[in-house]
Image (cartoon, rainbow, N blue to C red):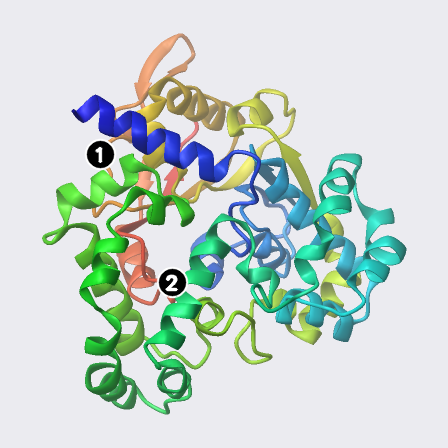
């Protein structure tokens, strides 16, 4: 039965993700990352692209270069589209597209302004998919597109059905944590967390829409009392009662389907848009391949790695790939290398035992890493996303 469950879960996950744009926005808080990365002018960053928002955010700290790597060409196509918009559009038009998620003249804008700046692969995708930004009754925003957008759309209509929209908007406008807590506990919690919702968020299909494969779910089930449904409920409560919501653009997007000028990623603020347009956007490049494939063909050094939570999946489904990835990381790391990653689990036990080869000797990855647990814990408590079990910052020694 366990093998059948694993097979079914993998089929659902692959069905959702194959040939799909999975993430229409980054679901990692770059404010924490930029503190943890402590970027300087000489830093080269390797990061997983996701939706590209955070690559644009990191560029504002003026590192030497950002290599955005993703196996999914659609994720890189999205970052390319944003970069094309920065290069060719005025701020108002850019914000309509990527802030509101729609524009009445998107066909025009795409053909005349954006398309000339795209790679052949990105053109092939957006030639068919630019109508994602047309809006409409069923999907009024780009942020209801893609796998994670399907979940956002379900949540949007669920909030309407529960008549919670005005109350949730009031929660984001609250002037203090005390006011947030009162609104959440007195008017939102019981109305929102219904038995059908709890059942739904336990399913593989719902979690696959969020990009959460079975191994990551199982980590939470093993380590959190109450399992994944209780974990998600407690995470949401923490975000809405213990962290100021006024600038929480992550959850605002899920509640409203669009960004607000005061609740948006940094690249959607006019002053930062202009800095990117003035040249910082040119410090980003996209690469469609695995991390180890990129590093094995790269001749320079990488000083900062942002690995998101993809190792949760590799640790269960492809340990040989995880080992090869760490070998490539060690081989290409600069002397001051630093690695950031997240996990759905409360504790990661699969990184340190990995063996890499250095000067004809086997070395444990854990013996090369110096963790900054204090800073990671401090930042994790301020995470505006709030749905990861743990966060890691580690310096990588070169031997």
Q: Which of the pair 337/135 is nearer the observer? A: 135
Question: Which label number is shown at residue 349?
Answer: 1
Quadrant containing the N terminus in the rendered view: top left
* Residue 347 visible at all: no
Pointer 2 residue: 385
Instruction: Work out whether residue 221 or residue 49 is closer to the camera in this orientation and state it.
Output: 221
**Which quarter of the rendered picture does the C terminus lie within?**
top left
Identity of the residue drawn at 52% across and 24% down: 292
Q: Position of residue 71 (x, y in %)?
A: 56, 32
Task: Between residue 373 and residue 244, name the one nearer to us.
Answer: 244
* Viewer-closest of 151 and 356: 151
In the image, residue 164 sits, relative to residue 369, either above or below, namely: below
Q: Is residue 382 left or right of residue 195?
A: right
Q: Is residue 230 above or below residue 158?
A: above
For marks 2 and 1, give the CA distance: 23 Å
Q: List the single residue furthest toward the top.
A: 360
């Amino acid at each position: 039965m366990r093998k059948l469950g694993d097979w079914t879960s993998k089929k659902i996950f692959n069905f959702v993700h194959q040939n799909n744009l999975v993430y229409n926005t980054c679901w990692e808080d770059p404010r924490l990352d930029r503190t943890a990365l402590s970027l300087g002018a000489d830093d080269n960053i390797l990061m997983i692209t996701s939706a590209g928002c955070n690559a644009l955010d990191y560029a504002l700290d003026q590192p030497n270069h950002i290599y955005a790597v993703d196996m999914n060409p659609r994720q890189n196509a999205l970052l390319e589209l944003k970069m094309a918009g920065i290069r060719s559009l005025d701020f108002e038009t850019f914000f309509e597209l990527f802030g509101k998620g729609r524009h009445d003249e998107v066909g025009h804008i795409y053909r005349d302004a954006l398309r000339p700046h795209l790679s052949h692969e990105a053109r092939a995708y957006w030639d068919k998919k630019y109508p994602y930004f047309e809006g409409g009754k069923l999907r009024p925003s780009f942020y209801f597109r893609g796998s994670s957008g399907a979940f956002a759309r379900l949540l949007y209509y669920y909030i309407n059905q529960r008549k919670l929209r005005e109350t949730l908007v009031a929660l984001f406008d609250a002037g203090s944590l005390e006011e947030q807590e009162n609104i959440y506990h007195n008017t939102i919690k019981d109305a929102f967390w219904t038995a059908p919702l709890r059942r739904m968020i336990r399913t593989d299909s719902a979690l696959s829409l969020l990009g959460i494969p079975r191994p990551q779910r199982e980590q939470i089930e093993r380590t959190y009392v109450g399992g994944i449904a209780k974990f998600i409920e407690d995470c949401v409560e923490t975000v809405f009662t213990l962290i100021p919501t006024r600038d929480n653009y992550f959850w605002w997007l899920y509640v409203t389907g669009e960004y607000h000028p005061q609740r948006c990623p940094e690249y959607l603020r006019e002053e930062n848009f202009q800095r990117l347009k003035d040249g910082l956007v040119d410090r980003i490049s996209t690469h469609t391949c695995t991390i180890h494939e990129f590093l094995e063909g790269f001749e320079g050094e990488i000083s900062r790695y942002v690995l998101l939570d993809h190792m949760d999946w590799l640790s269960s489904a492809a340990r040989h790939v995880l080992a090869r990835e760490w070998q490539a990381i060690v081989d290409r790391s600069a002397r001051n290398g630093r690695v950031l990653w997240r996990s759905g689990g409360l504790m990661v036990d699969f990184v340190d035992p990995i063996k890499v080869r250095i000067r004809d000797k086997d070395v444990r990855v854990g013996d090369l890493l110096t963790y900054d647990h204090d800073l990671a814990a401090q930042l994790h408590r301020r995470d505006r996303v709030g749905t990861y079990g743990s966060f890691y910052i580690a310096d990588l020694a070169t031997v």
